[in-house]
Amino acid sequence: MFKTLLTLWLTLAVGSLAIPTRTSYTDILKEVLKVVEKELDFFTEDYSAINVDGLFGLRLGQGQLRETLKECGQHGCDQFVLRKVTELEERLDRAANAALPYVETEDPDYYERFLATIDQPYITTYEPSSFEGVKATVGNNANYGEDNGDACYARILGTYKENGRFLPKCNITSDCFDYMRQTGTSRYFITHQLLYFILLEHVGCKENVEQSLGTKIRDIQDTFCAGIYEESKQISKSGQVNDFLRDLFLEQTVLCGSLGYEDFMRSDWIKMVLEWPDKRLGCFRNQFMKQLADITAGKNENKNGNSIPSVKSGKMKADDIMRSAYEERSSLSTMRKLQREKQMKEGCLSHTSGLGFGVFCTYLRFLVRYIPMYMF
Ligand SMILES: *[C@@H]1O[C@H](CO)[C@@H](O)[C@H](O)[C@H]1NC(C)=O
């Protein structure tokens, strides 16, 4: 059903009508590398404030960096890129390891449950695929139950306790299976369903499960990612993604992208996401905090470049901000807990920044994988 892509053109040309040129892609690659480094600077300074979900994003990214190095070894790549990625991966490894004890202290139970997802680089099975010709629809059930979902995850990770004892890993109850295969789901519900079938593979339950279910895990992932791709297209239709949907968009991209669903590596999307991290801090910020911080720092400047000193303009701004914060909250109320978001310094978001990091590393791997085929 899914056709393997042999050339870069098909995927990269989806979003932009122009045929990519040598400079445009090496430029994008350099941009991506810069952003990865900047974000890593942020995390290495602030690793004590990260949480489990943020660290998961970093480990996904680290897996992608390792795979990038492998691509370099197999297909060749620019020496500068090779050196840079090697250095970044080593720095990331140190920061992620150093963050572990802090993450544990902050939430020991959650840490214990999900340790297998954050204690080492997270390598996914990458099979280059395209959704060309696949019809998928976007579901409308976004009502994911985090507690049920987490219990199902714990059962496969071997961290589910029953009668004071841990059950052996790869435990799939029929309730969990039905829940995780439910159709018509969307947003974080479907991404968490997909994650379930990614974790299954990661912890070594794949053969076991495929035999007992008579289904290939990859087929399940195919279906989920085809649906998720439709949704990503939907939320980025205007060429931009609403602030409060960016975290979701990043989650969609990193989960499907790192499995090899290369439709997510559209050049217009790469360019769009490159604009999202804070230029100064390197992290993904809460827009509300960002605006507030800018006001207190006197950064709202008028057209002549002078900062506006009056209390009045500050107040007007504040009203706007309160309104947008309110709107953001009402649309997010059902997702807040699920995302387990945590504020880091200056309004930087742990979950979103971790995912964003994973996304950039996925882009990097993709670019390194294909660019040498016709550039060197
Ligand atoms: C999963 O755990 C339940 C107990 O919660 C047990 O009854 C069941 O046999 C286990 N299933 C597998 C496949 O290990």
Image: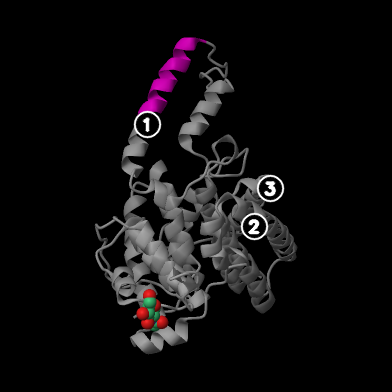
Q: In this view, does 342 lie to the left or right of 218?
A: right
Relative depth, front residue between 159 and 54: 159
Q: Height in image: 75 above or below 368?
A: below
Q: Mark 3 points at which residue?
A: 41
Contact between labelled residues 3 and 1, with CB atoms less than 8 Å apart: no
Q: How many marks?
A: 3
- Taking the image as drawn, is residue 348 in sight? yes
Start and end of the magenta stretch? 310-323
Q: Say what amino acid the circle numbered 3 marks.
A: Asp
Question: Picture quarter containing residue 2?
Answer: bottom left
The majority secondary structure of the magenta stretch comes to helix
- At a point 59% along the width and 71% down the height, the residue shown is 369
Question: Picture quarter containing residue 18?
Answer: bottom left
Q: Say what amino acid the circle numbered 2 marks.
A: Leu
Marks 2/1: CA–CA distance: 35 Å
Q: Quadrant of ligand 1?
A: bottom left
Front tag of 2 and 1: 2
Disc number at residue 324? Answer: 1
Marks 1/3: CA–CA distance: 30 Å
Q: Earlier in the sequence, mark 3 or mark 2?
A: 3
Disc number at residue 100? Answer: 2
Label 2 neighbourhood size at 10 Å, few (<14), some (14-19), many (20+)? many
Relative depth, front residue between 265 and 11: 265
- At a point 72% along the width and 66% down the height, the residue shown is 82
